[in-house]
Amino acid sequence: MWKRSHEMQSAEAKKEEFQKYLEKSGVVDALTKVLVGLYEAPERPANAIDFVKEYLGVPVGVDLEELKNTIAAQREEIESLKKQLAEAKGV
């Protein structure tokens, strides 16, 4: 009996700790704002998940892998151009 009571207290303590973590890190506020925004939307969006993503600033309908590849290629080009500039300046 004591063991079960102790386990329940431990689970409750973990739950409270996690709730404090979510509050402290701003997750609760962000989710509240998203849900209020969804509630106050003049028309319900066809895809609520996309609404939440857009509200939180996540690109929707964008190929992230393609963007990552583009960034990597541009970084390489920048480094190459920096070397060319340094060589042209005689550095």
Image (cartoon, rainbow, N blue to C red):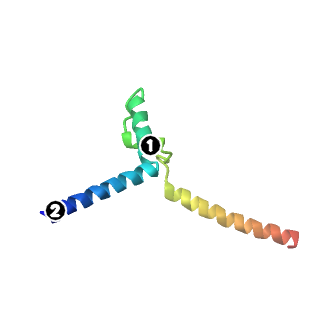
Q: Residue at x 50, y 59 (%)?
A: 65
Q: Quadrant of residue 21?
A: bottom left
- In the picture, measured across the screen, residue 76 lies left or right of residue 12, that is right
Q: Quadrant of residue 52?
A: top left
Residue type at the position of mark 2: Arg
Disc 1 crowd rating (10 Å Cα; few below 14, some 14-19, many 20+) is: few
Q: Residue at x 50, y 55 (%)?
A: 64
Instruction: Specify the label residue 4 is tagged with.
Output: 2
Instruction: Specify the label residue 29 is tagged with.
Output: 1
Whole-percent x, y for residue 32 in the image: 41, 40
Whole-percent x, y for residue 51 in the image: 42, 40
Quick one: which residue is furthest to the top in this view?
A: 42
Q: Nearer the viewer, residue 40 or 42?
A: 40
Whole-percent x, y for residue 13 in the image: 30, 57
Q: Quadrant of residue 38?
A: top left
Q: Element under label 1?
A: helix
- In the picture, measured across the screen, residue 31 lies left or right of residue 68, that is left
Along the polypeptide, which appears first: circle 1 or circle 2? Answer: 2
Q: Residue at x 53, y 57 (%)?
A: 66
Q: Nearer the viewer, mark 1 or mark 2?
A: 2
Q: Element under label 2?
A: helix
Q: Residue at x 49, y 49 (%)?
A: 62
- State the CA–CA distance, disc 1 to disc 2: 34 Å
Residue type at the position of mark 1: Asp
- In the picture, measured across the screen, residue 4 lies left or right of residue 70, that is left
Disc 2 crowd rating (10 Å Cα; few below 14, some 14-19, many 20+) is: few
